[in-house]
Image (tube, rainbow, N blue to C red):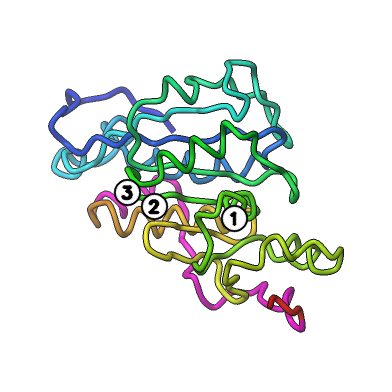
Amino acid sequence: MHLLPSHPVNTTIKAIQFGVLLLKSYQFQDLVGPVDYLNTHTHSFLDGIAPPAIVAKAPNITWHYISEFNDFSPITASSGPPQIPTTTFNQTPALDYLLIPGADIYHTFPVEATKFIQARFPELKGLLTVCVGSLHLSRTGLLDGKRAATNKVALRLTVEQGQFQQFRNVTWVKDARFVRDGKIWSSSGVTAGLDLAAEFARVNFDPEVNQAASEAFEYKANPARPDPFKYLLDGVDLK
């Protein structure tokens, strides 16, 4: 959906700098789902769709796509077109939020990526992970002692394959589509990223903006609970 803007951009409204970490072979929906949904809440998207009074309360979001390889080579996802990074670790401006989509279960960040996340975390207002993005984040130590959600099939596989030890410093929540612990937001399966994005919007954006975006997207978000896929971890020992 796109209509010609009818109102000038209000540069005084909330401006958000949002980083997205591009991992090799990341799950396409992990990225495009939350990004597209959150972008539906922006001034530029709602202008010409929603009443001016609502558009005036919508945020401006600038997206920064950061390659784990710290260069501008296109990153190929699980499907869809390659994504061209827009910045590098050294060139990325101050961020408000960072999104980490999931890739291979045992994906290991390059040292530069780990250092980037650890260095930027104190300044972030929030860090969001989708699917096994939380498994990746756990390797940085930033999830130690925290509650988090992740893809249940992937988590079960780490137990079955004897690989869970490296993830056991996190309290993995078995029965929620998304979890917030402090400023870390994590979601479980791939589509749960949309529900995480909706909850993020509910907390951070104006209710009328959220309603307008929900209607434009024609999406009714699911709550954290009940989680229809909690049975996937029945009997799985996560201690």
Describe the element under mark 2 as helix, strand or loop: helix
Foreground of the two, 160 or 130: 160
Local packing at callout 1 (Cα closer than 10 Å; few below 14, some 14-19, many 20+) is some
Residue 169: percent from left, percent from top: 60, 67
Q: What residue does disc 1 label?
A: 138
Q: Residue at x 13, y 43 (%)?
A: 53
Residue 227 in the magenta stretch? The answer is yes
Name the amino acid, label 1.
Ser
- Kindly give the residue lying farthest to the right in the view shown: 161
Q: Secondary structure at mark 3?
A: loop
Residue 54 found in image quarter: top left
Q: Which residues are magenta?
A: 209-235
Q: Is residue 219 left or right of residue 103?
A: left
Front one among 75 and 9: 75
Name the N-terminal-most of marks 2 and 1.
1
Of marks 1 and 3, the one in the foreground: 1
Q: Amino acid at mark 2?
A: Ser
Closer mark to the observer between disc 3 and disc 2: 3
Q: In whole angstroms, how far apart are the C-alphas of marks 3 and 2?
A: 24 Å
> Which dot marks residue 125?
3
What x and y, as percent, mark residue 166?
70, 60
Q: Amino acid at mark 3?
A: Lys
Name which of mark 1 and mark 3 comes first in the sequence: 3
Image quarter where the C terminus lies is bottom right
Tally the marks. 3
